[in-house]
């Protein structure tokens, strides 16, 4: 009798991709045997070694399951034109929190064979929840190594977009990611690296309002940010929620790293109760950073996170590790917990997150200058007035190598580093407009010139960066 | 792997998984494509009763009778069963050993993580071969967006 057999998607590749096949048979069993004669592989899928239909294969004759028609596996006759439908059992379940799959055992085998880690340690890593604040230079190696090591839940906070200037050090991203949200690119990269773990993107700007609730969802917080308001916010909320804060920062050729708020050790405020004056410490965007440096320091952060989870070794609690890349030297500064610390001292004054923007002088050195009373002019205004014939003396206080990259037309190269020695070249009766890359150094120059008796000063808001962006996008930016 | 598109059905999927909470939800994904030459495009999700006899909080089983009915219905509509979904109550959207072991190559498997009756993550997986790894398939909510897990906030 000709019988039609409908083949489920997963088995079609054994029969040349066909959805259905016609066979000649007198019974269901005969039809299946004829079918499986076409492919030994298909036979193994359908029948066990004893020739019995496998339990996860269901066969329907019309609307009837043949297991109901013949419970003991007896032959079931077919009629001319009957339709047999093969169905594969669909089942599964939720993971038990404490299991490692065969793939995971293999993936982490170099961990498992170490007596300091073993299967138990790897399970601890899997159960661990780590929040990386910032997915930039430090966050890149940090998140990559934590993901690779099998930290079970990895949260990442960032709201930025990948910029071409990031690629030099932020190894989570490739050139093709430029212009896309960092979190999207990072999540995809980390999931490809280790699909066994959970990556949780948090596309938010961390704030006093949202940090506490977020930190409570994690066991450890790693600070990979580059500004003071967020650094103090992370520190305070870590102290308030009892989460260890694995801290690091980098600048030019130097890096520092420590573990705060763990094992009754000190916090960041024990070391620095207050941020430095605005403009004193340039950011990496201003001062630059050697691309590999965050790679080294971010990897140290990852190391400390893993040690905390595994409970092994001596974490960097109560000591600030300093790295000098040019000298290739590590130094260590002991830090003691301060009884007077406003966050973790005996009588803390910080009992809830505060307003960190105003505490740190508005955005850690990147706020519009006029907020601090420094006279400033926008690039648009500057260009408009210059076109109308107004004359400006534009002092570009960036360094010579930066002048070589791009100059605002008519600008005078006057590096901040040469300013004390070249003061005599300037006339305190005249008005000077100060410009740098995007604002920090022109403010420093402003204060120095003020101290030297110059009265008529203003700074060009956003510096050459804003000029290229808003006035002449054809010029190179960096 | 090519992204699987879920036209307007992700909200249906979330809803089905949330109303089943704290039990595991399960059901079929119907649409077009094969995940290889033609991207999967899920146009409908069909809920199935969880027929696991033991612990419906942690396991699911779809009755073959329901599979048959869905297969036929999809065929008549010019579509096909692309794969199946289930939820992980209070657990991540990553496949369990059990999910990996029982997955069939060629089917698309979607897992929803539901915590406190809210869907917090959706992830899709597929096997290329019987013994091969369970690979993550990017989930595109509306068109080919390269995003593998949706964060529902």
Image (spheres, coloured by chain):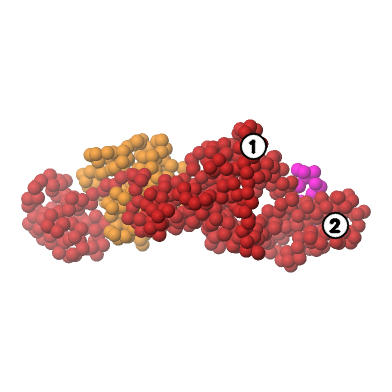
Q: Which chain is home to disc 1?
A: A
Asked if the residues shown at circle 1 and circle 2 are in contact, with their CB atoms under 8 angstroms apart, the answer is no
Checking the image for residue A407, the label placed there is none
| Residues indicated by labels 1 and 2 sit on the same polypeptide chain | yes
Q: Which chain is red?
A: A
Decide if residue A152 is on the left or right side of residue A242.
Answer: left
Q: Which residue is mark 2?
A: A392
Q: Earlier in the sequence, mark 1 or mark 2?
A: 1
> Callout 2: helix, strand or loop?
loop
Residue A339 disc label: 1
Foreground residue, A324 or B136?
A: A324
Chain B tint as drawn: orange
Which of discs 1 and 2 lies nearer the camera? The answer is: 1
Residue that appears at 27% across and 47% down: A91
The answer to whether residue B47 is seen in the rendering is no
Residue A380 counted in the magenta span = yes
**Which quarter of the rendering shows the N terminus of chain B?**
bottom left
Residue A243 at x, y percent in the picture: 53, 41
User: Label 1's element?
Assistant: loop
Quadrant of res A410? bottom right
Q: Which residues are magenta?
A: A369-383
Tell me residue A252's x, y (percent): 66, 59
């Amino acid at each position: 009798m000709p019988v039609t057999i409908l083949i489920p998607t997963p088995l079609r590749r054994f029969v040349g991709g066909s959805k259905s096949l016609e066979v000649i048979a007198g019974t269901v069993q005969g039809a299946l045997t004829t079918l499986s004669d076409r492919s030994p592989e298909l036979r193994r899928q359908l029948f066990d070694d004893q020739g019995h239909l496998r339990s996860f294969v269901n066969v329907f004759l019309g609307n009837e399951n043949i297991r109901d028609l013949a419970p003991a596996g007896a032959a079931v006759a077919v009629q001319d034109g009957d339709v047999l439908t093969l169905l594969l059992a669909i089942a599964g379940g939720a993971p038990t929190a404490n299991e490692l799959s065969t793939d995971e055992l293999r993936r982490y085998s170099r961990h498992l064979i170490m007596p300091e880690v073993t299967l138990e340690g790897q399970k601890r890593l899997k159960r661990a929840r780590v929040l990386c604040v910032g997915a930039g230079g430090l966050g890149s190696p940090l998140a990559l190594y934590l993901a690779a090591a099998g930290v079970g839940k990895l949260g990442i906070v960032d709201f930025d977009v990948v910029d071409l200037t990031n690629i030099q050090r932020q190894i989570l991203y490739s050139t093709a990611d430029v212009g896309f949200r960092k979190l999207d690119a990072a999540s995809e990269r980390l999931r490809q690296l280790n699909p066994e773990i959970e990556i949780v993107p948090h596309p938010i700007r961390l704030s006093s309002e949202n940090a506490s609730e977020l930190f409570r969802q994690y066991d450890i917080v790693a600070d990979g940010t580059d500004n003071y308001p967020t650094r103090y916010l992370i520190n305070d909320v870590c102290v308030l929620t009892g989460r260890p804060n694995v801290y690091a920062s980098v600048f030019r050729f130097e890096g520092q790293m420590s573990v705060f708020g763990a094992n009754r050790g000190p916090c960041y405020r024990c070391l620095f109760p207050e941020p430095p004056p605005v403009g004193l410490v340039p950011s990496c965007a201003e001062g630059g950073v050697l691309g590999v440096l965050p790679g080294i320091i971010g990897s140290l952060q990852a190391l400390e996170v893993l040690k905390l989870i595994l409970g092994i070794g001596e974490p960097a609690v109560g000591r600030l590790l300093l790295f000098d890349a040019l000298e290739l030297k590590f130094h260590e500064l002991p830090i003691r917990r301060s009884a007077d610390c406003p966050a973790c001292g005996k009588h803390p004054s910080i009992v809830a997150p505060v307003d960190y923007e105003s505490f740190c002088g508005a955005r850690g050195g990147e706020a519009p200058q006029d907020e601090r009373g420094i006279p400033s002019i926008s690039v648009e205004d500057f260009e408009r007035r210059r076109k109308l014939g107004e004359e400006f003396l534009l002092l570009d206080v960036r360094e010579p190598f930066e002048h070589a990259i791009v100059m605002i037309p008519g600008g005078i190269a006057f590096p901040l580093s040469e300013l004390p020695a070249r003061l005599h070249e300037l006339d305190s009766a005249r008005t000077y407009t100060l410009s740098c890359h995007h604002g920090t150094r022109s403010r420093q120059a402003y204060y120095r010139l003020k101290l030297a008796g110059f009265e008529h000063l203003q700074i060009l808001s956003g510096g050459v960066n804003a000029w290229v962006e808003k006035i002449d996008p054809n010029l190179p930016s960096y | 792997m090519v992204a699987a598109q879920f036209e307007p059905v992700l909200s249906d999927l979330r809803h089905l998984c949330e109303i089943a909470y704290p039990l595991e939800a399960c059901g079929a994904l119907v649409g077009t494509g094969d995940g290889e030459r033609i991207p999967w495009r899920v146009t409908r999700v069909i809920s199935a009763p969880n027929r696991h006899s033991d612990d419906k909080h942690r396991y699911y089983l779809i009755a073959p009778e329901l599979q048959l009915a869905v297969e036929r219905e999809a065929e008549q509509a010019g579509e096909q069963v692309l794969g199946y979904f289930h939820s992980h109550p209070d657990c991540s959207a990553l496949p369990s050993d059990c999910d990996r072991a029982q997955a069939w190559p060629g089917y698309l498997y979607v897992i929803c993580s539901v915590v406190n009756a809210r869907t917090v993550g959706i992830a899709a997986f597929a096997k290329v071969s019987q013994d091969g790894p369970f690979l993550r398939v990017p989930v595109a909510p509306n068109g080919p967006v390269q995003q593998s897990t949706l964060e529902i906030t």
